[in-house]
Image: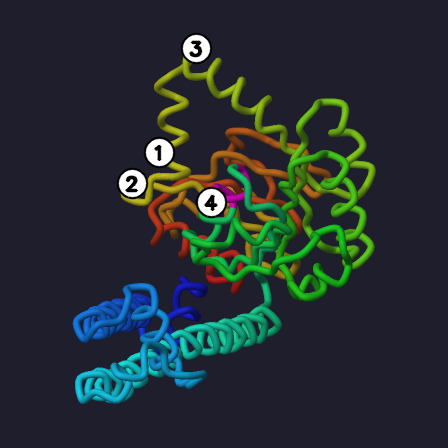
Amino acid sequence: MWGAELRRRASVGRPHPVSAAARLQRGVLLLGLVTLLGTLGYVVIGLEPEDSLYQTILTISTVGYREIGPAHLIDTTGYRVVTMTLVVSGVGTALYTLGVMLESIVEGRLTDQIWRRRMDKGIAAMSDHVIVCGWGRVGQTIARDIAASGTEVVVIDIDPDRFSEMELPFIEGDATDDGVLAAASIGRARALVTALDSDAANLFVTLSGRALRADLFIVARARIESAEAKLLQAGADRVVNPQHIGGQRIAALILQPSVTDFLDVVMHDADLEFRLAEVEVHAGSAIAGRSLRDAHIRDRTGALVLAMRDAAGRFRSNPTPETLLQAGEVLIAIGTPEQLLALGEAVADGATR
């Protein structure tokens, strides 16, 4: 995915986080071992345990406040050997541990900044992508399904904890803020999906999105039925109530399980040979103004037209061969990926004769 690739590129040339943590752990263990051995060394030559630990820490930290212990012990060779050994080994270990700690902190922040800057540049260069507002359970399903189809996705959410395992480009911010939507390149986006936790927030995002882009396709999530009409009035092209749709699906599984399973497989199973797709008949297409019989869609492409939707949004199911194909209509067809691709090319470039 685009986000995973961006993370991979941003991490090139820096130590893996696990190796940095291992080096820090090794430094702390060595520092603890040196402190323990130094304390034991001073105890062996005659210092009290408390004084031995204090002298060890003073020596390792290079503070050099004063030497602890009776004068007759300080002047002994053993005392000097322990101190010199601590200076050579302990100071080096302490500096190593401190260096690894600072390196991890500074390097992590710099890497995050570089990675964030690269991702922001990638988002700014996007076009024909989908903006998904909200990384909850509904938003995650939407974003992952869209990304799985090959369409680029930008996720917006205000909670930074939700992005810990994110593999998609994201913006941390309030989706109701016009500046955040602009940072998601809403000016070149294909669609805006608002799937926030409250209907009020979804309403606000819908208003903002429509104000920024009059031609933007907006899909809004509704939690309660009374909010659906308000979201449509605010500018949403489609309003989806997950609870309502979930109830309908359960009922369909009970009443017509085979039909429901077939539609699920056709829409979501990538291993199935046949797919459903929609193809718009643009003005100037060779099939515009022809009947289904004269266009020879089935003969030329192999795809089967199941329904048609006119510019007003009305559907015509199971159209007859005499049905005329008008510019602006959308054909809903079933076929293999190759057949549907041939249909799209035929409608777009006038290959159908």
Badge 1 amino acid: Val
For label 4, the crowd category at 10 Å Cα-Cα, with few meaning under 14, some 14 to 19 and many 20 or more, is many
Region of the chain picked out in magenta, as a range: 138-142
Residue position marked by numbered label 4 in the rendering = 277
C-alpha distance separating marks 3 and 1: 18 Å
Kindly state the secondary structure of the residue where label 3 is placed.
helix
Q: Nearer the viewer, residue 293 or 102?
A: 102
The residue most toward the front is: 72
Looking at numbered disc 2 in the image, what kind of residue is underneath it? Leu
- Determine whether the residue tagged by mark 2 lies in a helix, strand or loop: loop
Q: Residue at x 35, y 19 (%)?
A: 258
Which residue, given by chain and number where applicable, does mark 1 sit on?
Answer: 265
Q: Tell me if label 1 and label 2 are in contact, CB under 8 Å.
A: yes
- Kindly identify which residue carries mark 2: 272
Q: Circle 3 is placed at which residue position?
A: 255
Query: Label 1 neighbourhood size at 10 Å, few (<14), some (14-19), many (20+)?
Result: some
Q: What secondary structure characterizes most of the magenta part?
A: helix
- Indicate which disc, 3 or 4, sits on the residue closer to the N terminus: 3
Discs 3/4, front: 3
Q: CA distance from mark 3 to mark 4?
A: 26 Å
Q: Earlier in the sequence, mark 2 or mark 4?
A: 2
> Rounded to the nearest whole Å, what is the CA distance between mark 1 and mark 4?
13 Å
